[in-house]
Amino acid sequence: MHAVIATSKVDASVLDPEHKVLREQLIPAVKALPGVVTAYWLEPTEDLQGVAVVVFDAEESARQAVSALHVEVGSSIAPGITFTAVQVSEIIGHF
C-alpha cells in the first residue's frame, strides 16, 4: 500500500466548522478514485496548516490520483486551500 500525504495552508476566511466543502465535494471525489482504501483529513492547526492522508492499494493508484486531481505544491483543491507539500510514500507498517 501507498499513501499520499498532503499538507496545505488554509486561508482563515474559508474556515468552516461544519467542513461542508470537505464533506460534500472532497470526500466524494477522493472516495471515487480507483484503488483508494481509506483517507483522513486532520483539523487545521492553530497556524492553519492542514494535513490529508489518503491510502491506496498500490503506488500506481496513488500517483494516478495525484495527477488526476492536480495535487501539487502551490495548487488549490478548493478555494482558500493551497498545497504546501505533497508526497507519495510506501506504507511500511500498520495495525
Image: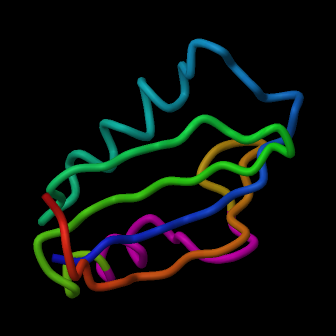
Q: Residue furthest top?
A: 18
x%, y% of residue 60?
A: 20, 86
Name the one closer to the observer, 93 or 4.
93
| For residue 88, side relative to residue 39 (left or right) | right
| For residue 36, side relative to residue 28 (left or right) | left
At a point 22% along the width and 58% down the height, the residue shown is: 33
| For residue 45, above or below residue 91 | above
At a point 57% along the width and 13% down the height, the residue shown is: 18
x%, y% of residue 79?
A: 73, 42
Quadrant where the C terminus is found in the figure: bottom left
At a point 40% along the width and 82% down the height, the residue shown is: 88
Name the one closer to the observer, 83 or 29.
83
x%, y% of residue 32?
A: 20, 48
Quadrant where the N terminus is found in the figure: bottom left
How does the figure colour the protein chain or chains? rainbow
| For residue 6, above or below residue 51 | below
Within the magenta stretch, is there residue 27? no
Within the magenta stretch, is there residue 70? yes
Q: Picture quarter containing residue 44?
A: top right
Tell me the magenta residue range: 63-75
At a point 44% along the width and 64% down the height, the residue shown is: 69
x%, y% of residue 59?
A: 22, 85
| For residue 2, above or below residue 16 | below
Q: Picture quarter containing residue 34?
A: bottom left
